[in-house]
Amino acid sequence: MSEAAKPPGSTDELGLVKFHIIAAICWLLLGMVAGTFMGYRLSGSSAAQWMGDYEFLSFGRIRILHTNMVVFGWLSNGFFAFSYYAIPRLTGRRLIALGVAKGNAVLVQIAVLLGAIGILSGHAEGVEYAEAPWWADIVFAVSFVLMVLVNVGTILTSRVRTMYVTLWYLILGFIFTTLNFVMANTIVAHVAPGAAGAALEGLWIHNAVGLWVTPMGVAIIYYLLPVILKRPIASHKLSLIGFWTLAFFYPLGGSHHFFYSPTPWWLQVLAVPLTFALIFVVYTVVYNFFATMKGNWKMIAKSIPLRFLLFGTINYIITCTQGPFHALLNVQQVIHFTDWVVAHAHLALFGVFSWWLYAFIYWIWPRITGHGYSRAFAEWHFWITLIAFWVLYYIADTIAGLMQGMFWLTTLPLMDSIEAAEPFWMTRAISGVLIVIGTLCFVISLMKKGNEGMEVADVSE
C-alpha cells in the first residue's frame, strides 16, 4: 500500500504519538522527583540538610526546574501526542509535513533539556513559567512554531467545514500560545520595565494555563468521553459557548496575579469581572460531561481512563470555582502570597490536566503498542496518587495558606506563621514521595503488557 493510500494515523502519526508519550512520562518522573526535593528543602527537615548547600540544589532553582519540566516536558509533550492522534481522525487526512514533525519531536526535548540546564546553572530569566534562558527559549519557540505548522496546518488544509469542538480548542491553544510565548520571552523579559513588564507578565502567567494547558486539556475530554462511552457529547452548542467564553475573556484577566501591586489600579479592578466570567467556561464543560455520562456511571468502576477523566473533572469544578472567587479583592486580602495559591495552582496543573492526560495515555496505550496495561498497577497508581495529592498535599497546603493569611492579618511576627506552617510543609514533602511511587506504578502498568484496554483497542476510532 502506498503512503498516500494508508488511512490517517496508521503509521507515522502513531510513531509520533508514542515518542511524545514516552518523552512526557520521562519528564514527568524527573519533574516529580524535583518537586519532592523542593518539598524537603522547604520542610527544613534532616533530609534538607542531607542535600547540602549546592547551588544547583537550592530551593529557588529546583522550584523553577520542577514547574518548567512539568509544564513544558510532561504536559506539553502529552498534548503534542494527543494532537497528533486526534487531528488526523477529526479531519480525515494525514498530518502534513511528517518529516518536520519527526525532527521537531527531538527538537522539543532538546529545548526542555537546555532550559533545565540553564535553570540549574543559574541563568534563569525573571519571567514566571518562562524562566529558561534566551538560548533555550529560541529553540523552544522554533519547535512550537513547527508544531503549529504541522497541527494547525493540517486542520486548515483539510476539507472539514464543520469542525468538532476539539479542533477549535486545539487551534486556540497552538496559535495563542505561540504569540504569548514570544511576547513573554521578548517584551516582558528584555523590553518592558518594572510594573509595565509585570502587567504583561500577568498575561503570560495567566494564559500559559488558560490558553495553553486549559484548551488542550478540554480538547482531550471532549474527544475521549464520547469515544469511551460510544455516544455523542450532550450539547455541541454549549461546548462552543464555553470555547468562545474562554477565548474572549481569559486573555484579559491576567492582572489578577498582581493584585495590590504597583500595576495600575484600573487594570487590577478590570481583572475582577473578567476573571469571574470564566466560571461559565467550567460549568459548560462539567454539564456536558455529566449529561453525556447519564446512565453510564457504572462504567467508572471498570474503565481506568474514565475514572481519571471523572476525578479530573471534579478537581476542575473546584479549581475553576476557586479561581473566580480569588479575583475578589476581599478574598485576596487573606490568601495573597500564601500557600493557598500554591495548592490552587497544583490542583489545576496536576489534579485536573495531568489526570486528563493520564486518562488519554491509558486509553491510547493499547492502540499504539498492540498490548494493554496492568490493571493492578493502574489501580495502585490511581489510589496512591489520589490520596497523596488530595489529603497530604492539597488539603494540607490549603489549610497552611489560610493559617498564613490569618496570621499576617493579625500582624503577628512572620516567624509565627512559618512555625505554624512547618507541619503542613512536612506533609507536603511526604506526599511528593508517594506521588513519585504512584508515578512509578503508572510506568510499570504500561510496561507490564497486560490485557486491560485491549477489548476496545481499535485504531479506526
Image: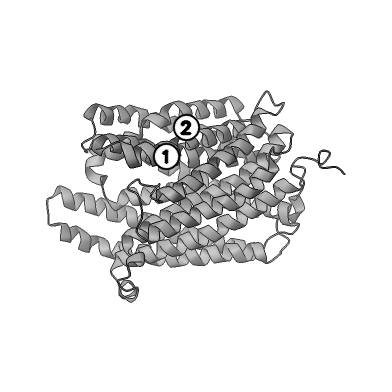
Compared with 112, 278 (above or below) is above
Q: Earlier in the sequence, mark 1 or mark 2?
A: 2
Residue at the image point whose x is 32% and y is 71% from the top = 48
Residue 330's x, y, as percent?
23, 37
Compared with 382, 218 (above or below) is above
Quadrant of the snapshot with the N terminus: top right
Q: Specify the quadrant of the image occupied by residue 183.
A: top left
Residue 438's x, y, as percent?
52, 64
Report which residue position mark 2 lands on. Answer: 281
How packed mark 1 is, by other alpha carbons closer than 10 Å (few <14, some 14-19, many 20 or more), is: many
Distance, label 1 to label 2, CA atoms, is 9 Å
Report which residue position mark 1 lands on. Answer: 320
Kind of residue indicated by mark 2: Val
Residue at the image point whose x is 67% and y is 49% from the top = 16
Residue toward you, 430 or 200: 200
Residue 42's x, y, as percent?
30, 64
Kind of residue indicated by mark 1: Cys
Residue 224's x, y, as percent?
64, 42
* Callout 1 touching callout 2 (CB < 8 Å): yes
